[in-house]
Amino acid sequence: MKKTIALIAHDGKKADMVAFVKDHLEDLRQANIIATGTTGSYVLKTGLPVELKLSGPKGGDAQIAALTAEGKVDGIIFFRDPLGKHVHEPDIQMLMRISDLYNVPLATNPATGSLIIKGLL
């Protein structure tokens, strides 16, 4: 059964996410990929199939948190901007709490993202 990986990136990290996806394209093709709306629209340009959720500020982080709580997400790669302020910070914190609660690996940078891909796929 295919693993499901969620991809999320703050605005200042979207280019990093696209570069990361390109570096891991063949591995990621073995997974079901879901992503928040804007991040996913960028990732789609790499040719990787992506199931789009809402953008983060409009509830996409919460959608992915809900899927994680339902056992439908195997790993999350979330390139956060640690220096930025985000109007949807409560949703971001909820996503991180849910990943901890349900023991779902969550990477916040490319190094741990690569480890999640190697570990899951």
Image (cartoon, grey):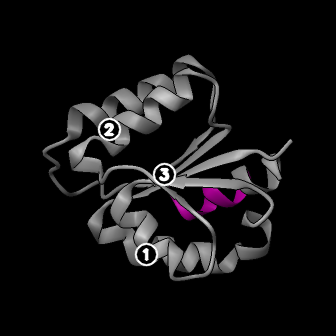
Q: Residue furthest top?
A: 101
Name the residue beneath numbered marker 1: 42
What SS does tag 3 mark? Answer: loop
What SS does tag 1 mark? Answer: helix
**Label drawn at residue 109:** none
Name the residue beneath numbered marker 3: 108
- Badge 1 crowding class, 10 Å Cα cut-off, few under 14, some 14 to 19, many 20 or more, is some
Residue pictured at 41% horizontal, 78% vertical = 15
The range drawn in magenta is: 109-115
The quadrant the N terminus occupies is top right
Q: Is residue 39 left or right of residue 75?
A: left
Name the residue beneath numbered marker 2: 92
Residue pictured at 55% horizontal, 52% vertical = 34
Question: Where is residue 66 drawn, in percent x and y?
Answer: 45, 27
**Residue type, label 2:** Ile
Figure quadrant of residue 37: bottom left
Question: Where is residue 76 drawn, in percent x and y?
Answer: 56, 45
**Residue type, label 1:** Tyr
User: CA separation, marks 1 and 2?
Assistant: 20 Å
Residue pictured at 60% horizontal, 73% vertical = 21
Residue pictured at 46% horizontal, 38% vertical = 64
Q: Is residue 113 magenta?
A: yes
User: CA separation, marks 3 and 2?
Assistant: 12 Å
What SS does tag 2 mark? Answer: helix
- Badge 2 crowding class, 10 Å Cα cut-off, few under 14, some 14 to 19, many 20 or more, is many
Between discs 3 and 1, the one toward the N terminus: 1
Between discs 3 and 2, the one toward the N terminus: 2
Q: Is residue 98 above or below residue 107?
A: above
Question: Where is residue 2 drawn, in percent x and y?
Answer: 81, 47
